[in-house]
Amino acid sequence: MFSQIFKKRSNKSEGESPFWISFSDLMTALMTLFLVVMAVTLISIKVGIPDTIAKEAARQEDIRIVMGLLKTESTPFSRVKVDEANFRVDLGDIVYFESNSYSIKPEVAAELRAYIPTLLKVKKSDKGKWIKRFIIEGFTDQDGSYTLNLALSTARSRSVICALVSPIPASPTLSNEQLLDIQRYFSLGGFSSYSIREDKKLSRRVEIRVEFLTLDELKKGQEKLLLNREFGVC
């Protein structure tokens, strides 16, 4: 008798307890929430990826336009060669160095001062917003040691900057704004026995590489720069 009463009470307790129903409802709600989050995430990814691809395609097209403009603007300077595909400007025989030398003659400096405003003009164009900087790269021939040529190539890059900012008699003078733009947008690079050409003279050259902003860099805006009107002595 007591056994029967105990069994009846036990069954009733299980039937009336809300625990298993509540737990099941909770799991169902969590699963539903998970599916909703996943659906929203997938939709965002599907929308975001094409948008990013479209923006990058537009950036590439703008860069193509910039390099085309740079080539057009460089036409009056017949010795300058613009490589649109590789974003490079070869100064040609405007600047060829003597062996183991990095000096630039006054007449060469005058030609550089005449050409560099072309780069700054393109930078200030509508599509020029993508230009991050112009990197002046010096090169050497294969003579000499690696470290010697590395120092020499860097010195050749630096000599181009010096030719632009140092006072040179009877040579075009850049404006104060152009001089500050050189600080803003020009940097140096050097290559030891890199990109050797058959003629050693042609190897001892200077090129300018155009570096462009990425989408994220353009969004962040230009980094703060320390500009100084005093260029110092080269």
Image (cartoon, rainbow, N blue to C red):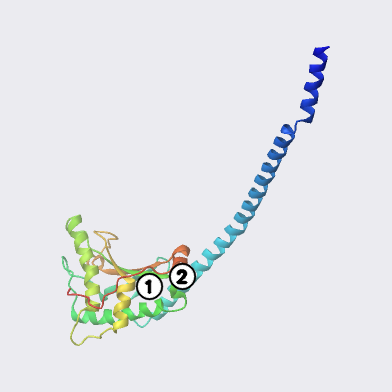
Task: Name which residue lies at 30% across and 71% down.
Answer: 226
On residue 222, which mark appears? none
Q: Which residue is mark 1?
A: 82
Q: Which residue is mark 2?
A: 63
Q: Amino acid at mark 1?
A: Val
Q: Position of residue 210 (x, y in %)?
A: 37, 69
Q: Position of residue 218 (x, y in %)?
A: 45, 67
* Camera-nearest residue between 81 and 174: 174
* Camera-nearest residue between 179 and 40: 40
Cβ atoms at labels 2 and 1 below 8 Å apart: no
Number of the front mark, 2 or 1: 2
Q: Position of residue 221 (x, y in %)?
A: 43, 69
Residue 92, quarter of picture: bottom left
Quadrant position of the N terminus in the picture: top right
Q: Secondary structure under badge 1?
A: strand
Label 2 vs 1, first from the N-terminus: 2
Q: Amino acid at mark 2?
A: Ile
Q: Is residue 1 above or below residue 83?
A: above
Q: Is residue 62 above or below residue 33?
A: below
Q: Secondary structure under badge 2?
A: helix
Q: Position of residue 225 (x, y in %)?
A: 33, 70
Quadrant position of the C terminus in the picture: bottom left
* Camera-nearest residue between 199 and 231: 231
Q: Is residue 41 above or below residue 130?
A: above
Could you tell whether 63 is left or right of 30 in the image?
A: left
Residue 139, quarter of picture: bottom left
Could you tell whether 162 is left or right of 76 in the image?
A: left
Give the crowd class for mark 2: few <14, some 14-19, many >=20 residues within 10 Å. Answer: many
